[in-house]
Amino acid sequence: MTLVHDDELDTATPAVAAMPESTVASSLTPPEPEPVGILDEHAKREVRRAMLSAVCIPGYQVPFGSREMPVARGWGSGGLQITLALVGADDVVKVIDQGDDEGVNAVNLRRLITDTTGAEETTEVDEATVIQTRHRIPEDEPTDDQVLVLQVPVPEPLRGVERDMMELARMHAEADYARMWVSLYEDVVRNGVITKSTGYPCLVGGRYVMATTPIPRWDVPRLHQSPFLSLFGAGRERRIYAVPPLTDVEPLTFDDIPFEVERTEGATCSLCGATEAYLVEVPASRPGGEGRWTCSDTAWCRRRREQNAEEAS
Amino acid sequence: MISTERQVVLEVRGLGKLFGDQDPGAVVRTGPELGTAKDPQGNTVVAAWDVDFEVAAGEAFGVIGESGSGKSTVMRMIAGDVTASAGTVRLRKRDRSRVDLLGLTPSERRALRIDELSIVHQDPADGLDLRVTAGGNIADPLTAAGWRNFGQIRERAAELLTRTEVPLDRMDDLVKTFSGGMKQRVQLARALANNPPLVLFDEPTTGLDASVAAGVLDLIRDLIESLGIAAVVVSHDFAVIEMLTSRCMVMQHGRMVEQGVTDQLLEDPIAPYTQRLVAAARA
């Protein structure tokens, strides 16, 4: 390494100019993807052990090592580690972000997974063996031979009511969820309804309260008695939890206040015409124009459009 | 026909607590006669020893003494916040079974605190979540006991707040916006939420000014009588003990120096220490 004196920095010559041409070129060209995995076999085993514990104790947050990933923590590093510990060359991976296979983060994670594991990629639910997702369960329900991997930002459902880690551990251990109920009570008193949208708290298998983060309420009932395995990974918080197939997932709500999913009266997908899907609002492209609704699950929406076109012709 | 038989709810026998070195020999080297609770030959503090009393349903028992006399330690041992060094504390539960409070695990004790034993603290911040509404503070023990119907929780909270004379239009206000007396009334409502057979009062009116304290004391006495709860009232204030309790004991240097009917004990104290205390209070 060359030492650069302060006075030399004042000159207009950029530091890179001093480097040989070939070095500059190689540092700017992305390296060819190497076939070696990001997680070594020991790391994969550790993650799998945490996953097994999580499956054995539905809804319980199992601590795991959470290694550094080539993505920032908070950008799906937890889900990524689960996927990397699960897949091999004979797997087919679908990655979605907000239901969209073409979201920048989804594309990058999918490339990373396929390049380093040799797994195939797909956008079709029925072709995938592992579906990694942020924010959605695909509209087409996965089956009992598929695994849903969710990227979780905040795994602790009680974070809003308690910050002390020891007290949180005690509350889960004793199933003491009174303060969660108080927060729901306060919400109804203040707002007339339970306002919690993503991360709605659910009782899993009649025992642990779990954050269904970050899926919308729309998808919460779909976790209940689902045929597929759901694995939740929080990389930053170093926790893995699971909803095994055919497990009860009950949203916390009062007996006289029914749990409701998001729904906008009259909203229809402007692309495929769907009404019975999770729709997102697309803001107007120019001021004063009207916003429109589209399906959040883009692959599902595209297939519906293709079917519509076939039927029309 | 209502049975006139006295139903003992709380039975305390030989309760004791040593702090510091756990030297049992310290017991004979301390006490009122020796003028200290701290072992002169070691590092043991005999915070309480040989404490016996019982409280029946609908009865309030007073524990009086100056700071450091051990009255708070007795209270905290019954509540389970301090582990006892000796003795038994038997509670008659709502299902009439009896349980030794000292033999419970922390989680069993917390479960008991939901509907068998409540505490009204001197500082409302210890017994309430001030960032939550009055109704929410009552919803806490109710949901802990399994209530899951919003309408019923509201109804029960309103009933309790009415009972403790908190205006219902404040039910949905945060408790931190309440006056001291009002906070104490909310604490009472919360303590009574699940009809516990035993309620412990720790200096319940010490932080309040005289006129507000009188109102709260009236209310507490009325609640103890009408609900038939057994109460233990810890206070350094004779006026509180006189107003609330029918029997009481006086503590000094970790020992019980006198126990009896409150009126009698205050009118005709036997122990010299009690005589001095009463004289000081009446002066």
Image: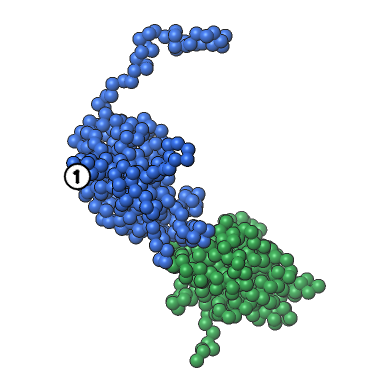
Chain colours: A blue, B green
Residue B38 visible (yes or no) = yes
Residue B241 location in percent, x, y?
67, 74
Residue carrying label 1: A311
Q: Which of A76 and B205 is in front in this view?
A: A76
The residue furthest right is B283
Quadrant in the picture for the C terminus of chain A: top left
| Residue B46 to residue A103: above or below | below
| Circle 1 Cα neighbour tier, 10 Å, few/some/many (<14 / 14–19 / ≥20) | few
The quarter holding residue A22 reads: top left
Q: Along the line of sight, which residue is nearer the eye, A28 or B64?
A: A28
Count of marks placed on residues: 1
Residue B163, by quadrant, is: bottom right
Q: In this view, does B112 lie above or below A58?
A: below
Q: Where is residue B61 in the image (x, y as percent from the top left)?
A: 61, 76
Amino acid type, residue under disc 1 in the picture: Glu
In this rendering, does residue B45 appear at all? no
- In this view, the residue in front, A118 or B17, is A118
Where does the image place residue B152, in percent across and percent down from the top left?
47, 70
Question: Which residue lies at the image location 22% right of the left edge and 41% below the top edge?
Answer: A309
Identify the residue at horizontal 21%, vertical 37% (top origin): A91
The chain containing the residue under callout 1 comes to A
Q: In which quarter of the image is residue B160?
A: bottom right
**The N terminus of chain A lies in which quarter of the figure?**
top left
Q: Residue at x 55, y 70 (%)?
A: B158
Please give the name of the residue rendered at 30% of the width and 47% of the height, measured from the top-left corner.
Answer: A273
For mark 1, give the secondary structure: helix
Residue B250 position, x and y percent, is 67, 72
Q: Is residue A245 above or below residue B96?
A: above
Q: In this view, does A199 lie above or below A18?
A: below
